[in-house]
Image (spheres, coloured by chain):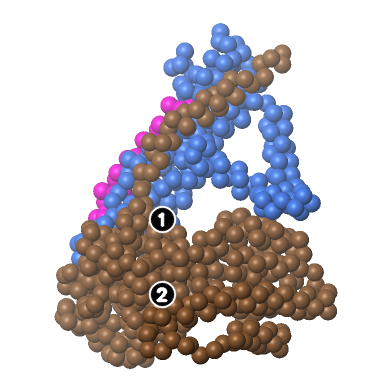
Amino acid sequence: MSKNRLGVNCLVLAFLFSGVEPLTAQGDPGSQAEELGARIEALRPLVDDAARRVEVEEQAYLDSVRAVRQIPQDTVMVGPFKVVTVAGQGPLARGFFEPHVAKIAPIIRGSEDLFQGHVWEFFYGWGGKPIFAEGEEVHHVRLSRRHSRERVDRSIEESLAIALYQVLPADAAGFRKWATARSLFPEDDLSRVYRALAFNHDLAGVRCLEGELHWCWEAVGLANVMEVGSYWDSPVQRRRLVESRYLWPYRAGWESDRVGVQGSLVRGCLHLEDDRACALLLSGYLWKSERPRPDYSAPLRGSGRGTLAAEAFRIGGEGSFGRFISRPEDSIRDRIAFAAGVPAETVMAAWMDRVHESRPNAQAGLLRSPPTLLLWLLLMIVFATRSVRWRLG
Amino acid sequence: MFRQILFVTWKATRFGMIPFIMAAFGLPLLSVQGVRHAAAAGVPLEDGRITTGAEVLEWVTEWSHLYPALALALGAVLALLVWNWDHRGTHVYPLSLPLPRWKYVLLKMGAGGVLLLIPVGVLWLGSLLAVSTVEIPDGLRAYPTAITFRFLLATLIAFAVFFALAAGTIRTAVILLIVWIALVFLGEGVPPILGGLLDMPRLSRFHFLDWILNTSMSWPGPFEVFAGNWLLIDV
């Protein structure tokens, strides 16, 4: 496989560089750019042709392997994603993948190459038929027929989100520590974000829900000045939070390596009611002092924070994911703004609007249900009164 | 006439309803058993634990699944109890009444509906009592009336469905059961085969049970109310 791919890549390079000449226009950047653009456009047919040949070569290689191993299977390309499945399930796999790929295809436009090594192994049916799938990253969507369609859809969404997560470059801003994979997929459920902001007892979450956007940055751990200790607005609240976070594992003897420092802070916070000790614990003091990594002990967890990035992708549309990963040296906040193509505050405002729209409604459907329910009741009454029992005699 | 039917129905169902009445009263209290102190109070419990909004919601969510289950069981059992004496007495009593069949069925259904209000009312009282005994953390609210109304709707539809089933003969019930099983087998087995033969992926993906569940439990399906929000305390 690798020899084959190498050969084809050489072919592509040969095509690309054939006829390349030095730029003639010197000194004028504008005309140089125009000339370069024209050359790129001229090379496009060659690149497309080479890409087609690559695909044919790869397919031929896979077919040869399959022939040797005598495994009949289908390979389908759904957008930029390669899905390998058992023979006959190609159309089924395409049908399942297409709606989900349609959601992220615009976002990753321009970054499709990143997913070249990713292969999805798909099977949906009874029994477990072997599938030969080769790639740098193989994602498995194998489900028994007893699972519902929703379960298959969820599995596909998760695998696509993981693929997005995997292609993120290792960067200084620590995005992977900031967000979880699942939260990156568009149209994630934001009602749990609302709940997390509403009842976590932190000042940032509550103020954020009330519409104070600068507190929202605090809530997602992306404020310019991290004041983690101020998330909780009173010493009593801080004590209670320390109690919920630290007392139980401390008593259970967990994290024994840190029990000395942590234990004294816990005692200082809870027994001596020293607010400084509580603030130190809540500000992730121990993490910062022991490990040189960004601390994200913000009120909202990674699964909620990542939805902000997903919102930026949604707003940014075409190529937003590519823009996001193009600036690994920038802060997450700046990258979110760059991906969305609008100021960071606008992304935050849009995200908050969607969080508010997703507010769980305990009374949802209570007005809508009764009229239809009445119709169903009438239908049941008709069935009951039409019983034939008394006609038997 | 309705009073007499109501009285007879009450006599036929009262003992069977006792466990449900107790459950309806106890369930809201159990839902909030862990919510003993509100976060706003700022007083840690003796065992060192505190109550946060997250914990409250976790407890309430764990118990929330039992409300629709109770509603379904109550509706089904009451419907069967309502018809119990008629089946055991081989329908001699209703035949002796100067009533047409449809009117008798309507009176019986009405009586069952009235009796349903007892456990529903008890659930409302239990919910009010439960939420009054705990302090609810900031950001959360109690919904005793909403959950009671949802419970009423759920018990009514469950009662109506099982009442209609029980009104028929055993033969009808067996036929319906056989038809249902056949539909499940055919609905689950045939579409994948046909989809493969006709090269129709959409047909291959069809799941009969999924479809019937989604259709019946979403608007305007009859069991939509069962899929609603059953949290006694929520944001």
Q: Residues within 10 Å of mark 2 (few under 14, many from 20)?
A: many
Name the quadrant of the C terminus of chain B.
Answer: bottom left
Coordinates of residue A77 in the picture (x, y in percent): 65, 67
Question: What residue sits 26% from the left and 57% below the top?
Answer: B139
Q: Residue A123, relative to residue B200: is it above or below? A: below
Q: Colour of chain B?
A: blue
For disc 2, the chain is: A
Coordinates of residue B95 in the picture (x, y in percent): 61, 13
Report if the CB atoms under discs 1 and 2 are less than 8 Å apart: no
Instruction: Write down the region rendered in magenta.
Output: B112-136
> How far is mark 1 from mark 2, CA to CA?
37 Å
Q: Which residue is mark 2?
A: A324
Q: Quadrant of residue B49?
A: bottom left
Which amino acid, mark 1? Thr
Question: What residue sits 22% from the left and 68% below the top?
Answer: A214
Q: Residue B214, relative to residue A105: is it above or below? A: above
Q: Which chain is brown?
A: A
Query: Does A157 sit left or right of A321 as displayed?
Result: right
> In this view of the protein, which residue sits in the foreground, A270 or A41?
A41
Coordinates of residue A187 in the picture (x, y in percent): 45, 59
Which amino acid, mark 2? Phe
For disc 1, the chain is: B
Coordinates of residue B10 in the picture (x, y in percent): 47, 26
Q: Residue B83, relative to residue B235: is it above or below? A: above
Q: Which residue is mark 1?
A: B61
Q: Residue B42, relative to residue A227: is it above or below? A: above
